[in-house]
Image: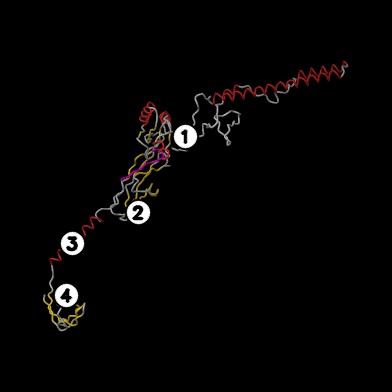
Amino acid sequence: MLVSLTVGKVDAGVTVLLTPDKRLIEFPSILLPPDISSGSIVDITVARNATSEAAAERAFRGLQEQIYSCFGAAEPTTPVLRCRNATQTSVVLEWDPIELATADLISLALFRNGQKAGNIPRPTAMHSTKISGLAVDTEYAFHLVLRTTAGTFASERVVVRTHKMTDLSGITITTGIMPPATRENLAKAVERIGARIVDGVRIDTTHFVTTEGRGIQWEKAQELNIPVVRPEWVDACEKNGRILGVTKFYLDALRPPPNEAPTSAISTAQKDLPPAPTESSSKPPEPSAEEAAARNKDGAAGGEDGSDDDDEDESEDSDEQKQSENKARSEAEQKVRAEEREEQRLAMRPKQATVEDGDGHDGDDDNGLAVEKGGKSPGDSASFQNVEF
């Protein structure tokens, strides 16, 4: 298409062109011939470039595909939740790693029975969690809710039922240092009760069984507050057919020494001792009615016979002397019996270790038993925890 235009005003940047119907068009001066001036007529040819249009369209479509493939094709995946282990009072849940694609993470929350239980800390790094303090033999429903800048995604509900007290299959044991024979017997007992032994301390480890409090795994169990018990705990659970508390089976719990007399023997020995005499036993026995009547009769006869008061005084003095002798004898017997009981009690009492006083001198306990300098009592290193099942 050819168009003839008349040059009106020529400026350095813009030239004003006039159309045949007297319309003004501003046109860049750089696109006009350099020798034009006002009144010159220029011919301008205008045509559509289809080839360039097609090339521009192809470039635009390619850019759109690239943007979509980078930012629009992938989206965050829905979390997949499952139960890893369950006990009488706890549940261990795990899920696949969170895929966010190009979205940003807002939060990952755990819901229990339809109510929010809390947010998962470090959701991109943590793939499991442990919920404690649950009721025994109770059903719970859990699910995860992932919130991102690309939307909210909720996992399927996982229904878990906590175990009964007689169900020992949820016990997961990590073993520590122990003799080979003890380890072999422990493995057999664990297999019989339906529990399992895992290598290393994990999030689903319920008990750490060992005979010595040392080692890397023992330290890790201490950090995670996992009960550290002796192998006798497994034997006791198998014998009773139910899960037992661990307080009496802690590795550092007090155990009676082999030579210590049992409490029943001490109580029996104390029961066999003769009873201590009371104040009433030190008094002379009261005379019977017949003896009192005889004495009154003798007194009356003495009065009729004219016996003097000196005989009565002598009899009264002799009675008082006998009473004092009987009282002294009973007090001596009571003192001897008390000393014998004290000696028996001290003999049956286990020897205690003494602690050093604040000045660094050896001290005696309340019962006068000497204790070794720098020693510890059996309960100094005991650690009793309250573990409920």
Which residue is at the front of the view, 259 or 90?
A: 259
Amino acid carrying mark 1 in the image:
Thr
Give the residue displayed 77% in from the left and 18% down from the top. 291
Are the residues tagged 1 and 4 within 8 Å (C-beta)?
no
Q: Return the disc, 3 or 4, that comes first in the chain's sequence.
A: 4
Residue receiving disc 2: 106
Report how far apart the C-alphas of labels 1 and 4 lie in the structure: 97 Å
Q: Tag 1, which secondary structure? A: helix
Give the residue at mark 3: 59
Q: Is residue 265 left or right of residue 43?
A: right
Tell me the mark number nearer the camera, choosing from 1 and 4.
Answer: 4
Sequence-first tag of 4 and 2 = 4
For residue 131, above or below residue 232: below
Does the stretch in magenta take in 163? no
Q: Residue at x 49, y 29 (%)?
A: 255
Tell me the mark number nearer the camera, choosing from 2 and 3: 3
**Spatial separation of the CA atoms under disc 2 and disc 3:** 36 Å
Q: Which residues are magenta?
A: 87-96
User: Residue 316, position in %: x, y?
Assistant: 81, 20
Question: In which quadrant is the N terminus drawn?
Answer: bottom left
| Along the viewing direction, whichever of 331 and 361 lies nearer the viewer | 361
Query: Label 1, on which residue?
Result: 247
Provide the secondary structure element on which disc 4 rests.
Answer: helix
Marks 4 and 2 sit apart, C-alpha to C-alpha, by: 56 Å
